[in-house]
Image (cartoon, rainbow, N blue to C red):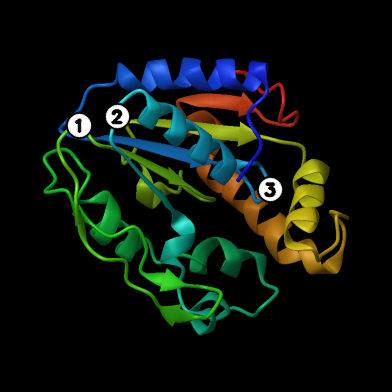
Amino acid sequence: MQPPASPSRQALLEQLATEVEALPTDPYVRLGIDGVDGAGKSVLAGELTAVLRRRGRTVVHASIDGFHHPRAHRHTRGPSDPEGFYRDSYDLAALQEQLLDPFAAGGHGRHRTHVFDARTDTVHLAKQQQATPGTILVVDGIFLHRHELRGRWTWSLWLQVDRATTLRRCAERDGSGSPDPAAASNRRYVEGQMLYIRDATPQQQATHVLDNNNLAHPVLLR
């Protein structure tokens, strides 16, 4: 269980939740929480989900990490290739078919929150569930503003965090890896995410940009 949010962070979460509750349903609401690895996407998405549920809203929380390609596909261009990390990591067709299409305008709501387990490199189909009208879908993960996913989000956030901070967080979270942006072990991920930022301009595509460098005091930049 994660510790309670600071008063400043809790106030921001309440502000975001109020804005989300005012969004029109068609019959669903689709939120995307985007940012590079270590930006704090899954934590913030979980916190926002909790606030919305306390307010009585039905929320489905999922991650793009449940839609990885198998390792052999992810490493087609080589295990250290940055473009492969950007282009080949995720099965966007499965993400859209199993999760985003059901929540699209006029969608039927029958969805799966994950289809693959990257840790075991095996298919892992979630049980298909039926969403009721008014349900809010919250998806966290990297690359959510890729060109293939444009127009999929009712509302989205880009978490802006310094690279050194994100790598330190990743090293602390995983218990391994180097916090040095120049380390060879980070090349695939750092350069792959830089490619994404140049190619997809997520800061411009997102509804809001949030400075999440200071977890206790995040700042809404736009």
Q: Is residue 100 above or below residue 87?
A: above
Query: First in sequence: mark 1 or mark 3?
Result: 3
Q: Is residue 9 above or below residue 125?
A: above
Q: How busy is the neighbourhood of tag 1: few (under 14 within 10 Å), some, or many (20 plus)?
A: some
Gap between marks 1 and 3, in whole Å? 31 Å
- Name the residue that disc number 2 marks: 57
Residue at 24 percent across and 36 percent down: it is 135
Q: How busy is the neighbourhood of tag 2: few (under 14 within 10 Å), some, or many (20 plus)?
A: some
- Name the residue that disc number 3 marks: 38
Q: Nearer the viewer, residue 202 or 111?
A: 111
Rendered location of residue 183, percent (x, y) = 87, 63
Which label belongs to residue 134? Answer: 1
Task: Please report contact status of discs 2 and 1: CB closer than 8 Å, yes or no.
Answer: yes
Rendered location of residue 195, percent (x, y) = 62, 52
Residue at 38 percent across and 75 percent down: it is 124
Question: Which type of secondary structure does the marked residue at label 3 adopt?
Answer: loop
| Mark 1 or 3, closer to the camera | 1
Look at the image and tell me whether residue 146 can be seen. Answer: yes
Residue at 65 percent across and 51 percent down: it is 37
| Mark 3 or 2, closer to the camera | 2
Question: Which type of secondary structure does the marked residue at label 1 adopt?
Answer: loop
Task: Please report contact status of discs 3 and 2: CB closer than 8 Å, yes or no.
Answer: no
Look at the image and tell me whether residue 222 can be seen. Answer: no
| Number of numbered callouts drawn | 3
Q: Amino acid at mark 1?
A: Gly
Q: Nearer the viewer, residue 44 or 200?
A: 44
Q: Amino acid at mark 2?
A: Arg
